[in-house]
Amino acid sequence: MTVILDFLSSISWWAWVLIILIIVAIRDIFIQRSHTISHNFPIVGHFRYWLESIGPELRQYLVANNREELPFNRIERGWIYASAKKENNYEGFGTDRDIYAHQHIFINNAMFPFKINEKHPNALDKSFLPCAKVMGEFNKRKKPYRPASIINVSAMSFGSLSAKAIESLNKGVALADAYHNTGEGGLSPYHSNGGDVVFHIGTGYFGVRADDGSFSLEKLKTLVEKNPFIRAIEVKLSQGAKPGKGGVLPASKITKEISEIRHVPMGQDVLSPPNHSAFSNVKEMVDFIELIAEETGLPVGIKAAIGKLNQWKELADLMKKTGKGPDFITVDGGEGGTGAAPPSFADHVSLPWVYGFGDLYKVFKEKGLTERIVFIGSGKLGFPGKAAMAFAMGADCINVAREAMMSIGCIQAQVCHTNRCPAGVATQSKWLQKGIDVPLKSERLAQYFKTFKKEFIEITHAAGYEHPCQFTMDDIEVNVDDHNLSKQLSGTYQYNKVAVPFTSMQDLKDCIHLGGIKKNNK
């Protein structure tokens, strides 16, 4: 044994390197058969796979220009990071955006901006910007809710995101007087840190699931009674990343904690089907909504990506006839989001937000139903300019997912589906999560929201309005084509938004149904 150790210790470092390379070459040529490149080009072939694996990082930091990347370019990410850190988020020497590009947005400013006095709510709080509508007001729900912020955290589940990420988001929305959508993974302890919550019900009914996988009304009632910070219920019909497609939660990912939160068994795969078992048509869906609203007292809405309109027209007809239906509708863009999906779905199924929302809004406008519905936009709208366009088209609130993730540290590594998120945001790895400082990240989410609202208010005032709900389709223009260089939204999408009833910001501030702020002052 001593002789062997002496022999091994006598081998120089370069000889060890050579030995290792020879072993790798033998393995590449004679043992592995799955990679043609490394078989035909032993050792050096590995560099090809390594470069491919870091391709996104190389393009992100070294190759792509400031406006080139998708889904979010460097300028967009930089604005979110700077806003979240309360750093200088201004641009100098003019925009580097091609303002003649297709779909570029122009906001028509007024000759004289809206002027606020020293006692105006926005003079006292530059980020005070609640929703102009009250969820559940028309249908006379027992617990109507006016979101205290027009920007909120979209549906992202615990399990998809890490515990520390969810906790950071929830504490952040509490600081920003916003709400936090749970996603379909159920209500976790990490959603219970002071923020208003919208409870999301998906096809798997996680968190309110009976033993046979069906929906349990009793579990939902118990959940709402025990957690008074749940302000509304959202029923998911589909999502932008993969509309009409279910999913599987592998047994390997089901920890004891996730099992208890989602009410699913340990040790076996759990199916999240494409269809709901609690209803199968529009009438049954409306009955389901009314049942939940009656039993919980909360406003109930639906979330969907938009494609065919026949069943939406059926819903509008039924709402018109019965006076019943969803209190809010969240329109998800086909641009996709945090949910992993096959490229065929992410690239092609359902309409982008701007097309889908316009089509849907027209359906409800034709029936005179827009005033009873709070419309929520979700699809890369977490920038004041895009939000102005959304409000001009009829949105009343916006939900953000990836923008919120970036505010707490996401670097757009695009490996959310691998459980290897380097920022600790979209992973269940305890080691990677350790990099998230919850108090710091929650403050950054809150600061991003506050900066967003402050700049959105400034844009609104520049257009001559007090609240974004007053934007009209004629206030925004977009580049269309070479013949019509730019058109007002009303000409581009062929409709005019219905005016939202609005008196003043002070009246919104005094509303007894205002969430967040009123809650914190009690």
Image: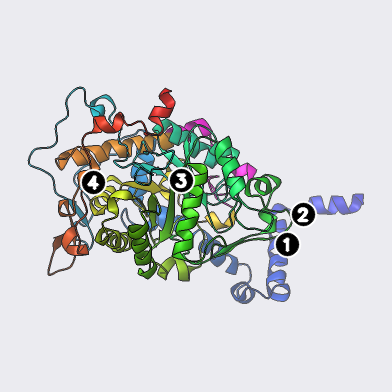
Look at the numbered disc 2 and give the secondary structure of its residue. loop
Answer whether labels 1 and 2 touch (C-beta < 8 Å): yes
Residue at image mark 4: 500
In the image shown, does 369 or 96 lie closer to the viewer? 369
Q: CA distance from mark 1 to mark 3?
A: 45 Å
Q: Which mark is residue 19?
A: 1
| Rendering coords of residue 376 (x, y %) | 36, 50
Residue at image mark 3: 405
Give the crowd class for mark 4: few <14, some 14-19, many >=20 residues within 10 Å: some
Q: Which residues are magenta?
A: 420-443
Magenta includes 522? no
Who comes first in sequence, dot 1 or dot 3? 1
| Rendering coords of residue 48 (x, y %) | 54, 67
Answer whether labels 2 and 4 touch (C-beta < 8 Å): no
Look at the numbered disc 3 and give the secondary structure of its residue. helix
Q: Label 2 amino acid?
A: Ile
